[in-house]
Image: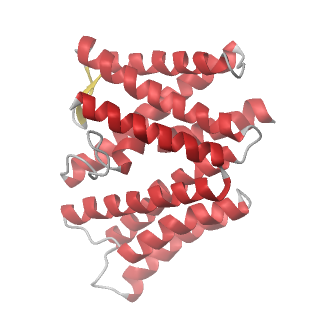
Amino acid sequence: MLVQRFVSGLLAAIAAGVFVWLGGLPFLALIVFAAAIGAGEYDRMFVHKGHQPVSGLLYVGTVAVPLLVYWFGTEHLGVIATAVVIVPMLYPLFRYGEYSVIDAMITAYGILYVGLLFSFLLLLRNLPGGIWCVALALVITWACDITAYFIGINFGKRKLCPQISPNKTVAGAWGGLAGSIAGLAAVSLVSPLPVPHLLALGSLGALAAEVGDLVESAIKRYTGVKDSGRLLPGHGGVLDRCDSLLFVAPAVYYYLLAFIIN
């Protein structure tokens, strides 16, 4: 299982690297594809629990958000988010009995959770030095996940959040923090990053990665599924593989805007 996990993860990382390097429409296509698969996984998890998300709207909205962000950037982000909140709530009004308010809320959250958060990878790629900006998010995520996994297995005793994710440990979380900072230190050998930013961004990214992982774990725990999907052997679905990245990407984006790029 570990070998299968490593091989599939390595191939996915290489493919992601190629699309990040290409940028533009190829990278947009990758993000839209990942968002569409993620929307399907999200929909199936809540259907498994007995809810009825507005599936068509969920798919369309999740794909539309990255497209709109690609074309308009952050200029109309508030309008997009407002529409995502309002439109699903029309369904329990005009199709009462078929969709509940809870179903509409699940739909709206799914579009924001999958579609909007994936879009931050596009925003990172469009920043000056976009390849390195995306690389920072990827390195933080992968370094945190890998070190948290191995430190947790070998040294973890005290549980981090047992009611949500019984396998996660406090030692693993600290290992993820150290791994994120070490990963950024390695990147800074190629693209220098001042030590204060290295420590701050590594810490913020590690926290975002842990929270993103726990959020998806909470969704899976609530809906009663083990994995969100089966796309990647040994890793599960798109949401299983990208749960941390979905939170790291906006954290890195806003940090870069606030403290480095501007």
Q: Residue furthest right?
A: 262
Residue 77 shows in the view: no
Quadrant housing the C terminus: top right
Q: Which residue does the image show at 70% across and 64% down from the upper left?
A: 71
Left or right: 23 as drawn, with respect to 161: right
Q: Residue furthest bottom?
A: 94
Position in image of residue 72 (x %, y %): 72, 63
Position in image of residue 236 (x %, y %): 28, 45
Residue sitting nearer the eye, 164 or 220 = 220
Left or right: 145 as drawn, with respect to 218: right
Q: Which residue does the image show at 27% across and 63% down from the upper left?
A: 44
Q: Is residue 211 above or below residue 100?
A: above
Residue sitting nearer the eye, 93 or 70 = 70
Q: Which residue does the image show at 27% across and 84% down from the upper left?
A: 97
Position in image of residue 255 (x %, y %): 66, 34
Rendering quarter of residue 211: top left
Q: Which residue does the image show at 60% across and 44% down from the upper left?
A: 20
Position in image of residue 7 (x %, y %): 33, 34
Q: Is residue 150 above or below residue 81?
A: above
Quadrant housing the N terminus: top left
Residue sitting nearer the eye, 26 or 193 = 26
